Structures are given as C-alpha cells and as structure tokens.
Amino acid sequence: MKRILSAVLILILTMSIFSGCATTGKNVQSTKDNEVLTQLNAMKEQNKKPKEMFEYLNQNIKEMNKASATEAAGILVNVLEEYETTYNEQLYTGNIPDLMYQYFEFAFDYSKIESIKESELKALLYDITLGGFKIVDAEGTFMVIVDYDALKTFNEYIEDELKTYIDIMSLMYSDPVAIDASIMVNPEELEKRIVQMEDYIKSYDNARRKEIMTSLYLGYMMVYMSGTDNTPIFDYDSGTMNANMFKTFEKAAVTHKDTIFGKVMSKYVQILKQESFTNTEKVQDFILNIDIAVSDELAKLKKK
C-alpha cells in the first residue's frame, strides 16, 4: 500500500495514458480550412512524421478561422501524444542508448546533434526535436516528451479549450510536481494546479483531452493526499500523519469548499480524524478509490 503512489508518479511523469483517436471539431467554414484539415488527416493516415505535420500546420494556421484552427491543432496534439511512445521506443533500439550516452552522457544538448557521425541517429534526433518534442533527462535516462511550450505557438489562433489544455500540460512538464519520488512544489501550488485541472474538466467537453486531464487530476490528488516515497505524508514507522500537513488539509477543505477537490478533502479530513490520523486500511481505501468520490461529485453537478 505504501508504494501505491510510485505508480501514480510514473503516470504523471511519463504520461503513458496517451492513447485513443482524434475527435472531430466544429464545422469547416472555408475552402482553406477544409484543405488544411483534409491534408492533416491524410498525413496522419499516411503515418507522416510529426515534424512534417507540425511544419505544415505552422505554415497554414494563420489563414484559418478559430474553430477550424482548433480542430487542426487538436489533430496535431493527438498525433504528438500518440507518437511519444513510438519515439521513446526508437530511442532505446539497438545501440542508440550507448550512442546517446557517448554524445550526451546525462545532459541532452540540442546543439550537439549536428556533430553526430551516425546519420540515422542524427536524423532521428532532428525528427524528434523539430517535430514538437523535447528530450529530457529522467533519473539517468533520456525520455522523449511532447513539447507543449512549442505548441503555444498556436495559442493565439485556437479556442480557449485547447489553449487551456496546452497551458496545463506545459506547466506539468516545465515545472514538475514530483521528481525522483519527491514532491517539488508546496501544497498551495499543488492545490492550485488541482483546481485548475478541475476547472478544465468541468468547463470543456473534448472527450479525449478530458479523459487525460481527469487521469492527471486524480493522480495529483493522490499525491497531495498521500505524499510520495521521499516526501511521505505518513511516517513510515508509526503510520501517523504529519500534524502540519493535517492542518493544511483542513485549510484546503475550507478554502476550496466550492470545488470537488474541496468536498473530497472535507471527507478525507473526517476519515483521518476517525482513524486517529493514522494510515489505516480505511484511509488507504479512500485514497485508492478517489475516482469514485470524484465521479460522485461530478454526477451531482450534472443533475443541477
């Protein structure tokens, strides 16, 4: 039970939840819009590299209306998120890991790509870094992640739903909540991000992105409520809760009382009191089944 959050952190850091298909947007209103959307969908079907799709959209998005531009950018976002796994697999094929260490050791540097002698590796790294991705160092290994900062290039042309999604995802990677199983932000910042995710979930209806955001939202709440291996909420030996953290939980329940997060925290505070602030099976069950509590609160909103 104590190590359940390790799995959550892997989810948050690697974003293995990226799967599924693209959803269609609003009606196309011009010949140019139709042309770009048709071409992007064709490129996707033909398994064109994300770099080609990124470059194509970057050249044409300015001429599209906002609804169509949002749909087009959404297609690209879906492709990038789905392709993330593909590039991570390619980065660990054959002798590429050894070559990566040879050229970069543990710090990837874009400027060094040009000096790489192996043409296939050089081409792969350019495809990755010019295609809407970046390569980061993750606990001594290299990982390919979607570069949401690069996608902000499209923010002025797209609708608030996708822009908000990109902004949230960008912050998640540029300023991680946790690194090496240690929480890196203070409780107030983590609360802020949880509420921001909740606002997105309650405000928008894009099925695919809403599913991704909900998974992250639940993961962040679990980290907030239970801590991590290196920053635990409960003492490993006694199982008792940090007193200051309990006060933080009480304050969060009041501060965010009008949110689902606040209502869930209010229930959690009551359970902690009942269990004498100890990490009992009842406490762990509540954390592990947080999705049920959230679903119940979302259902109440739909009935209003």
Image (cartoon, helix red, strand yellow):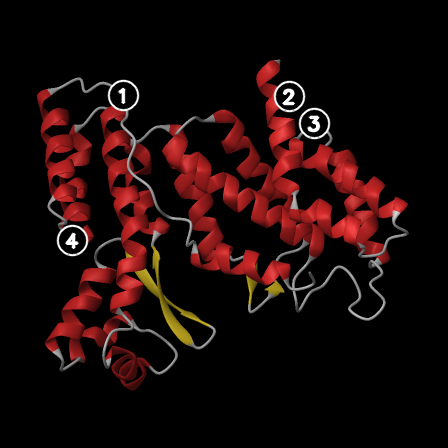
Residue 250 in which image quadrant: top right
Q: Nearer the viewer, mark 2 or mark 4?
A: 2
What residue is at 50 percent from the left and 32 percent from the top?
200
Q: Is residue 158 left or right of residue 60?
A: right
The extreme top residue here reads: 304
Quarter in which the C terminus is drawn: top right
Q: Position of residue 153 (x, y in %)?
A: 29, 43
Q: Amino acid at mark 1?
A: Lys
Residue 99 in which image quadrant: bottom left
Circle 3 is placed at which residue position? 258
Circle 1 is placed at which residue position? 26
What secondary structure is found at the residue carrying circle 2? helix
CA distance for labels 3 and 2: 13 Å
Q: Amino acid at mark 4?
A: Lys
Residue 72 in which image quadrant: top left
Q: Position of residue 138 (x, y in %)?
A: 44, 70
Residue 256 visible in this rendered orientation of the protein: no
Circle 4 is placed at which residue position? 49
What secondary structure is found at the residue carrying circle 4? loop
Circle 2 is placed at which residue position? 300
Q: Amino acid at mark 2?
A: Lys
Q: Earlier in the sequence, mark 3 or mark 4?
A: 4
Q: Amino acid at mark 3?
A: Asp
Q: Is residue 154 left or right of residue 175?
A: left
